Image: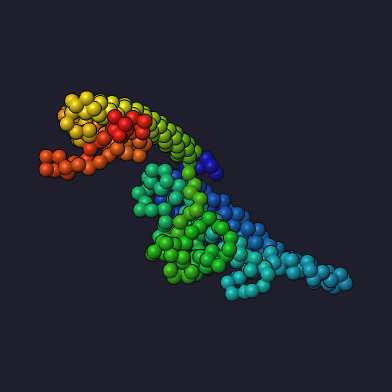
Amino acid sequence: MAGLSDLELRRELQALGFQPGPITDTTRDVYRNKLRRLRGEARLRDEERLREEARPRLVFLGILWVKMGKPSAPQEAEDNMKLLPVDCERKTDEFCQAKQKAALLELLHELYNFLAIQAGNFECGNPEKLKSKCIPVTEAQEYIANVTSSSSAKFEAALTWILSSNKDVGIWLKGEDQSELVTTVDKVACLESARPRMGVGCRLSRALLTAVTNVLIFFWCLAFLWGLLILLKYRWRKLEEEEQAMYEMVKKIIDVVQDHYVDWEQDMERYPYVGILHVRDTLIPPQSRRRMKRVWDRAVEFLASNESRIQTESHRVAGEDMLVWRWTKPSSFSDSER
């Protein structure tokens, strides 16, 4: 059957009384399965016809058997009756319920295959230009009616069974708002396969794309972490350089304030203190003062909290209040002993 061409497949189906739709890559396997079932049904009909033709003979033989005192077993007669075609549309016996269940499972199987193929096509380039993987319920019902010749009532019964079943059948029923849970058949707007069926080439290409994407993400993360590490190292180095510059500035300030005090002791300076801004202007050139502002501020803060030989005072100089530094000698060399 796999060797049949599309034209031969169509002729075989038409010969068995089934009018197929367009035969494409997505429907070819479905129509082959349909042809296989139609052939099986035709074979069963032939066997039934032969049984019908042989029934008068069996009746005659049965009567003859009864006449001879050999009644047939009731169980055997019942089994033979079950071989006959039965209309189970509105019957509730075991045989009919099993037959209806088999028909329902066949419908669900066809629906599952159809939705899986459509979802796979959508994932693999969407050659049929589908709007989404969720197939409208009317389109799915029309397809199932063409393939299985099932009525709309049976299709709705299948959807009802999916809604009431707690099993994962691989089919999602969705409404107009796909974020809301569907509870009744009349609210079903479309059906979607939970397991798209994709070809080998599509699976390989998707797996390759996923692998390449993961590798790129890994290298991007690695590059980000490397850049972050370089940035942190640069920041640490700058902080170390700034701290070293601060200590050098503290040393220079101490030398300037101490030299000023020595000059005052030798009557070379008028005041024993020196203005803080004056020291800054002496140590830092004008073009570097903005760049060195943070270093200077840290040095001033360090002296205020960690240097006991320099005292910060406020004096009025030239009519303005000004912060100044005064060098403080040890007690053994205080001014009172001079």
Q: Residue furthest right?
A: 69
Report the residue at 50% width, 62% height from top. 149
Query: Residue 101: x, y in percent?
Result: 61, 64
Report the residue at 26% width, 35% height from top. 326
- Quarter of the figure with residue 331: top left
Color encoding of the figure: rainbow
Q: Judge by depth and name the residue closer to the eye, 182 or 55.
A: 182
Q: Indicate left or right for 188 with 277 as reference.
A: right
Instruction: State the quadrant of the C terminus.
Output: top left
Q: Residue furthest front?
A: 337
Instruction: State the quadrant of the N terminus.
Output: top right
Q: Judge by depth and name the residue closer to the eye, 296 or 47.
A: 296
Query: Is residue 141 positioned above or below 36 on the image?
Result: below
Q: Residue furthest left?
A: 319
Residue 103 in sight here:
no
Report the residue at 41% width, 51% height from top. 22
Q: Indicate left or right for 335 with 75 as reference.
A: left
Query: Is residue 109 positioned above or below 315 on the image?
Result: below
Report the residue at 33% width, 30% height from top. 333
Query: Residue 175: x, y in percent?
Result: 42, 64
Query: Is residue 280 positioned above or below 49 on the image?
Result: above
Report the label total.
0
Query: Residue 301: x, y in percent?
Result: 31, 38
